[in-house]
Amino acid sequence: MPKSQEKSYEDEDMEDLESQESEAGQNALDLLREDHRKVQELFEQFEQADTRSKQRIVEEALTELEIHAKLEEGLIYPAIREETNAEELMDMALEEHHVATTLIKELKKMKPKDERFEAKFKVLAESVKHHIEEEENEIFPQAEETDLDFSELGMEAMERKEKLMGKSGKSSSRSKKKSPSAPGRAASSRKRKAA
Amino acid sequence: MKQQAKKQQANQTQQGSSPGSENAVELLKSDHAKVKDLFKQFEGTASDKEGLATQIFNELDVHAMLEEEIFYPAVRDQIGSEQVADVEGEETDEGETDEEVDDLEDEESAEELIEISYEEHKLVKELISELRKMDPKSDQFKERFAELKEDVLNHVSEEEEVIFPAAQLKLNLQELGAQIQKKKIERMSAMADR
């Protein structure tokens, strides 16, 4: 699977993305895609890492996955489900979350030196990778066909993410990305139009 | 259940192995084929889906036990740290190249693959345990059952495409097969006597 997924922006002011972020909100699906890349990177790092690094990588991956899953289940999936006919797809996605959650719970009780710690993490990794592919290749494209305002969803997702990261004791790396907004810039310029 | 075991033994004999010495890989593959067929029946117009599901769970339980107690230890102990043969681009029975299989085989030794297999079994057992408690007519049962099927098929592909070929090169499959067959009959009898 390629490391960097191509973004399917149709918006022409893509270069101004950074400065627009704080006012209009980043596209929620792009936020999720970034999370995916981050977690995939952690999975790859795990393969090459020494024991001590493995512990750190797993902790980080599990935290990222838990927060990401909560965002999807609490905010993104319900929005997509309401606007699409993809009931079965969404149900399957939830089942895949259930598998990941089960494995995460078990991994949290273990230490890297435990006999099957690595093997269990690898099973989680394979499951998550497969889930990411289904989301990005099947769910997200369907979602993008709808009238959903992903900028607004993105803003709400960011707020929830900050809260969740605060709860998990993790400092937010995203808040640094926000730059001063240009006064009077219309948020509607980033609204997705229905296909 | 006893009848099934006898039938299987007869089939094995017909497949060309000498009486009383079944090839372990052929036995396990035969189990895989049986479960795949049961999954297909489940998706068809079968009327007793609940019964089919229970049969699938029981088959998987027994099969997993045989692999964990006999086959996996043999692979781990006798092939262990060796890198396993590359079988890139091979299609699964479902007609698609399994990328996840390719990912694993590039990096894992036989021992690591076996460890992963044990963990995959655990996950499947967890799903079965949950499914046994659910209402078979519910939507959630349907979805979780679909997840189970996907996980099982993925696991089967990994075994048949990577682990079995390695086992065929290195292990005494007749001896292992005899052990597996014996244990299977014991287990089936125990289940029938309940």
Image (cartoon, coloured by chain):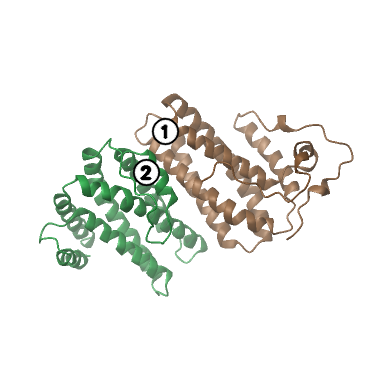
Gap between marks 1 and 2 measured at Cα: 25 Å
Using a 10 Å C-alpha cutoff, classify the residue at mark 2 as few (fewer than 14 neighbours), some (14 to 19) or many (20 or more).
many
Along the viewing direction, whichever of B50 and A13 lies nearer the viewer = A13
Residue A65's x, y, as percent? Answer: 55, 40
Residue, disc 2: B105
Numbered circle sitting on residue A110? 1
Say if labels 1 and 2 share a chain: no
Quarter of the view holding residue A142: bottom right
Q: Tell me what residue is drawn at x 41 percent, y 61 percent.
A: B95
Q: Is residue B3 above or below residue B23?
A: below
Look at 44% across and 64% down and name the residue there: B136
Tag 2: amino acid = Glu
| Mark 1 element type | loop
* Chain letter of disc 1 in the image: A
Circle nearer the viewer, 1 or 2: 2
Point out the image quarter for the C terminus of chain A: bottom right
In the image, the chain rendered in brown is A
Seen at 68% across and 54% down, the residue is A79
Residue found at x 47% / y 67% = B137
Quarter location, residue B119: top left
Residue at the far left in the pictured view = B19
Report which colour depicts chain B: green
Letter of the chain that mark 2 sits on in the rendering: B
Q: Determine whether, in the image, residue A43 is placed left or right of residue A81.
A: left
Type of amino acid at the residue the image marks with label 1: Met
